[in-house]
Image (cartoon, rainbow, N blue to C red):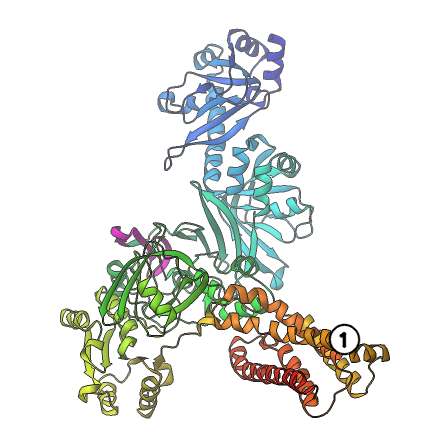
Amino acid sequence: MIPHLLRILTSSPEFAWATVDQRLELVTLGLVREVETTEYLIHEGREGSSFFILISGELEVLQKNQSTHKQMVLARCFNEGDVIGEWAATRTQQIRSASVRAVQRSSVLEISYSLMKQCGGYSDLIHMSSSRGHELSNHDSLMQKSPLFRTLSNQGSSTIASSEKLLANQEIIFTEGDVSTKIYFVLSGSVEIYRGSGSKRELFTRLFNGQLFGELGVIRNKPRSASARAVGDTRLLTLDAKRFLQLSRDNLKLGEYQNSLRKIYRTRSGEMVLQVEDRIDGIPVFVSTIQLDESRQLVTQFGIHETFMKLDMLPAVEAALSFTFVDAGRNIHRRLDVAQGDVIGARLTGPCIESGRIVEAIRNKETLSLEVLERFEQTGLLFEDVIDNSIICHCMQIKRDEIEEAVLDGCQGVDSIMRLTGAGTVCGGCRGDLELACGHEPFSDFKILETLEIAPDTFRIRFTPVTDTPLLFFRPGQHILVEGEIDGTPVSRPYSLTCAGDEDRWREITMQRQPHGLFSRWLSEVDLRQAKIRLSFPRGVFTSNLNGDSTVVMLVAGIGVTPAVSMARTRARISSGTRLIIDHSARTRPQLIYFDELTSISKEFDSIEYHSRLSAAGESLCFDDLARYHSSHPDAHWMICGPEKFEHDLTAWLQQLKVPDLHIAREQFEPTELAASKPITKDRTSSLLTLMTVIFTAIVLWSDSVPVGLKLWQQTTSGHWISGGGLLLFLSSQWIFPFQRALGSGSNSARTLPWHRRLGAMAPLLLLLHGNSVGMGLLTLITVIFLVNSLVGAFDRTFFSDMKFQQVYLKWWLFPHIGLSIILSALALFHIWVILGHGGP
């Protein structure tokens, strides 16, 4: 054993200082110990009196996480000669900073600090420990900052061939096209990743302490795709590529990590975004690094399943002031770090509709006044300006029409959109809007908390989530889709929200029960315990910023007061902001729903006015009333909600008063069947096939080119009835899809649509099978309408990319298609009646 131990010490660089006699003394006086599996060799927090040299087996180094109080694997030691526990010799009272236990049965040589003093090597041990302590400090720092290094260490790879490297300012690390042989971690300083040189140099990103680079070329076994150089004095930790790849092949967890190691996006402003998926304290997060310019980076951590977000600027700014908003009742905590009026960091816990705007403010160096920051501490909100609805993702600067175009090009689902563009991965604030843009309503399961009849046939209904997850805030004035299952069929309807925008306990709607309204009658009478309710994410742009300095005038009638109720409740919770004027018209007093509440709010808050009118008593809103409002508030924003004629007349009057169109908003729900439907995928194959079959059938029938054998079969009784029955069966089956859409069965109609198209493409061949010429009179009319309708059906709205034009085209396309289908079905039935009643046409 002694010769073996001497060989270990001789080959160990940690004992290069020792003479032969000193090594022999350590081996002979040291204690050889056997450590069983899971047995602790060192305990964190206890005083240390010795260190250990690994002879055989495997040990793991553990440290308690201060936030979770769980032990975290820092490293594993499995190389003969590895030294453990020497760092405590340099610490006050020699307290252990971590625990060590055996992963398998192991042998170690224990050497006490007193023995080192006896053999004259204690000062060398202190020097070695100090150097080792610096390495361990870097190791611990990287454990906290680098997902990959944490994964490597947890898998025992802290002993892979690694070394520190000090570089001077502008020193090249590697150049584009070099062989990828190493992976790098930044210990201090910074590194630029760029392409080109001189005036053509393009900066991709700048990396700082704890960040990783060079791994993509190693993993993909490709030359360097860009160059890297040091900025200022820089210290790097380099990892050998061959050892790293060997470990990756042997380790499933590390291999899985590599699959989502890094995604690289560009914002529409040209900024480079590097992104990884990680777990922090067991919580999955997106970590994104946005290169704002040559000197600034924004690093964000966004909880994938949790409502929290962390933003930090690099390089860090020390002299920063913090402004906080706390609503403990709803578990909302917000902190802004501000330096010289510029936001440089944030911590957001709980729903926050402004997270994307905060990222944009950091990007644009938007200076915030002390008044704005004081309002943030009171309300938790920052911005007064009108939201640009053309931008769907403020973090990545992605516009709504870009997402819609991607959907039309066949990109299905939010996950696909996120992978393609990066939208929704930085702060998550636009996830609901992405769902809507993709045509997929993000429905969630809710239960009915309360149903209350507040006026005859008018009900206030509150829905609460099935889970205990707090609801995201919404913009007052928005609406939701409420979906229920009636006789096994999902039916949905849009309703304006009446709760305050920051209400996270429930969603509240107010609806009128219509005598012939299927859904409203069901929703007002359904058993609360048995109802299966699903709600969409709040949607719509019928809203206004209540933190601004302008005036908002809401002109509402009847049940159209519901968005005004949400606006009033939200404005009442804000200490300062917009002046809100609500003018509510109804025929009779009972129809002035929420009269008492709105009157009470207006008396309590000077910033809210409420005026009611009874049209049956001759108090209808007129042009002169609008003129007085406009004279008192010339820069006001106007919001109109009520019956179609009411909205039309008031809009015309406001235009006569020269109110800009941008200052006039009318509430308009999207048609339910369109709002709840999935995007129609392009089917150019069916369209092309339809065109070919129509042309082929027309040529054959008009030129009388039907084969003689087919003509003879058509003239037989069986051929006549079989071909005619097949044609009639086709006409009947094509009505299944429109009936499903009319009944609101979106999921069934989505499955039926492909078959509807494909059968329609083959329909002209069925006509050819039944007839051998265009015929005369009625038969000619049926043939022409049949072929024309086939062409109309083939060229639907999916041929156009613009979503707005699609909706316009749909209206013009739908009526002739359905009209021709009805005429064709009627003529076909008349044709059958003629045959059955008169023996033939």
Left of 763 or right of it: where is 315?
A: left
In the foreground, 438 or 166: 438
Could you tell me if residue 660 is visible in this image? Answer: yes
Estimate how packed mark 1 is, as few (under 14), some (14 to 19) or many (20 or more) residues with alpha carbons within 10 Å. some
Q: In which quarter of the image is residue 383?
A: bottom left
Provide residue 424's location: percent of width, then percent of height: 47, 59
In the foreground, 802 or 613: 613
Quadrant in which the N terminus is drawn: top right
Q: Which amino acid does label 1 sit on?
A: Gly
Provide residue 408's location: percent of width, then percent of height: 58, 69
How many discs mark residues in the rendered view? 1
Q: What residue did someone put label 1 on?
A: 719
Residue 344 inside the magenta-drawn segment? yes
Quadrant in which the C terminus is drawn: bottom right
Relative to 61, say whether 209 is above or below.
below
Left of 216 or right of it: where is 551?
A: left
The residue range painted magenta reads: 325-353
Provide residue 812's location: percent of width, then percent of height: 54, 84
Left of 768 or right of it: where is 439?
A: left
Left of 712 or right of it: where is 828?
A: left
In the foreground, 3 or 823: 823
Relative to 680, say whether 293 is above or below.
above
Residue 567 inside the magenta-drawn segment? no
Relative to 261, say whether 15 is above or below.
above
Residue sitting at 40 percent across and 24 percent down? 44
> Could you tell me which secondary element the residue under label 1 belongs to?
helix
In the foreground, 732 or 272: 732
Question: Which residue is situated farthest in the left direction here?
Answer: 603
Could you tell me if residue 368 is visible in this image? Answer: no
Residue sitting at 69 percent across and 70 percent down? 685
Task: Give the prevailing secondary structure in the magenta stretch.
Answer: strand
